[in-house]
Image (tube, helix red, strand yellow):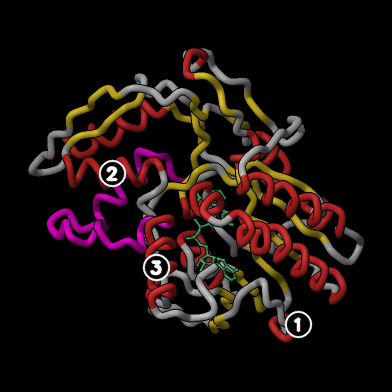
Amino acid sequence: MRVLVTGGGGYIGAVLCRQLLEAGHRPVVLDRLFWGRKPLAGLDVEVIRGDLRAFDEAWLTGIDAVCHLAGLSNDPTAEYNTEANWQMNALGTERLVAACAVRGIVRFTFASSASLYDSEISSHDVARSPTMCDETTELSPRGAYSLSKKYAEDVVLRAASDAFAPVIFRQGTVYGYSPRMRFDLVVNTFVKDAILQRRLYVHGGGWMWRPLVDVEDVAAVHVMALSAPLDRIRAQIFNVLEENYQIRQLAMLVAGSLGLLDPPIRVDLREAPLPEFVRNYRMSNAKLSRVLGFTPSRTVLESIQHMLERLPLDRLDEYGDPRHYNIRWMTLLEEFHAEQREFTSIY
Ligand SMILES: NC(=O)c1ccc[n+]([C@@H]2O[C@H](COP(=O)([O-])OP(=O)(O)OC[C@H]3O[C@@H](n4cnc5c(N)ncnc54)[C@H](O)[C@@H]3O)[C@@H](O)[C@H]2O)c1
């Protein structure tokens, strides 16, 4: 299949493109290329440099399926410019979905987020285990990012028909190695901090829960949906995670893994105060397993090991590249464009 991968130049997209090629598909990347072309180096993919907000029907010519990943991909970047976030994540998705439905591009996967389940709680309540959310849990999204993802989900579900079988994946926080590395995701941040600072700060004991999943498994779920029976995926929502972990556990897994290197790297764990409000949520992957038979392949522990084998432990300066931190890179590009007095900015 010729598969349009929006956001194919990103952290998940670069891994997804590789997996699509391995599965015999032909990926076509549609991306603003916020992080450049380097993540796609060595992959035989067609690249369209374009912005979802300036939708062009021609992008869909000859396309058999769409994996839709493009957009602002975390809370800080969405809050930095809420209007741009809405244009990209909500309205950009709406336009793309409508065009695919009209053209009869039957298979459409959408990268939504587990942050839809997130409910901010007072730090006094952090010791209480949050309830397990599933795809039927009532949602009350608050931030710009979650609100835009919820709007996009509703648009996707409303458009479903006999000729259009979109599927929504509520992805947990992703970890693991990608050619477009992100160090602003909890496990990856811990690995980077452990290597650079030999110290990890665990806020309030780190009892908060997060659903987590390896980047290879997230990509594999999208690939699998391209051949899954249509009646199992049409207008369905699936949580995508390997397991729920407490932040404290993650810090210990990272510190322990570095301690087992040869020579070992000793990492201190330190307590730090909690902010007034914290995020604390868990979700179930039972539906993904029951309906699609998907079993995640890589635990956090295995993924940390994999990252340690691939990341440069001796070239510490590489971790400072702002491209690895979404909000840092966004603000830098914004300043750059302002200095150049260009009429458009990255937003
Ligand atoms: N990484 C996670 O932990 C995670 C968790 C849940 C959901 N998601 C979702 O998965 C998707 C991919 O996330 P990621 O971690 O790969 O993020 P990423 O920021 O690495 O990649 C996003 C890609 O989209 C492109 N893009 C952004 N706005 C665009 C626009 N208007 N037009 C065209 N291209 C645009 C960027 O250039 C980038 O290459 C996102 O939709 C994100 O919200 C990610």
| Span shown in magenta | 298-326
Q: Which is more toward the observer, 289 or 324?
A: 324
- Spatial CA distance of label 2 from label 3 is 29 Å
Q: Which is more toward the observer, 300 or 160?
A: 160
Q: Which residue is rendered at x = 72% and y = 46% of the image?
A: 150
Q: Which residue is rendered at x = 66% and y = 49% of the image?
A: 169
Q: Which residue is mark 1?
A: 57
The amino acid sitting under disc 3 is Glu
Q: Secondary structure at mark 2?
A: helix
| Residue 307 is one of the magenta-drawn residues | yes
| Residue 16 is one of the magenta-drawn residues | no
Q: Mark 3 CB in 8 Å range of ligand 1?
A: no
- Spatial CA distance of label 3 from label 1 is 32 Å
Q: Nearer the viewer, mark 3 or mark 1?
A: 3
Quadrant for ligand 1 reads bottom right
Q: Which is more toward the observer, 119 or 223?
A: 119
Q: Which residue is mark 3?
A: 335
Q: Nearer the viewer, mark 2 or mark 1?
A: 1
Label 1 packing within 10 angstroms: few (<14), some (14-19), many (20+): few
For residue 94, side relative to residue 76 (left or right): right
Q: Which residue is rendered at x = 47% and y = 53% of the image?
A: 215
Residue 189: percent from left, percent from top: 33, 45
Residues marked 3 and 1 touching at CB (< 8 Å): no
Quarter of the image containing the C terminus?
Answer: bottom right
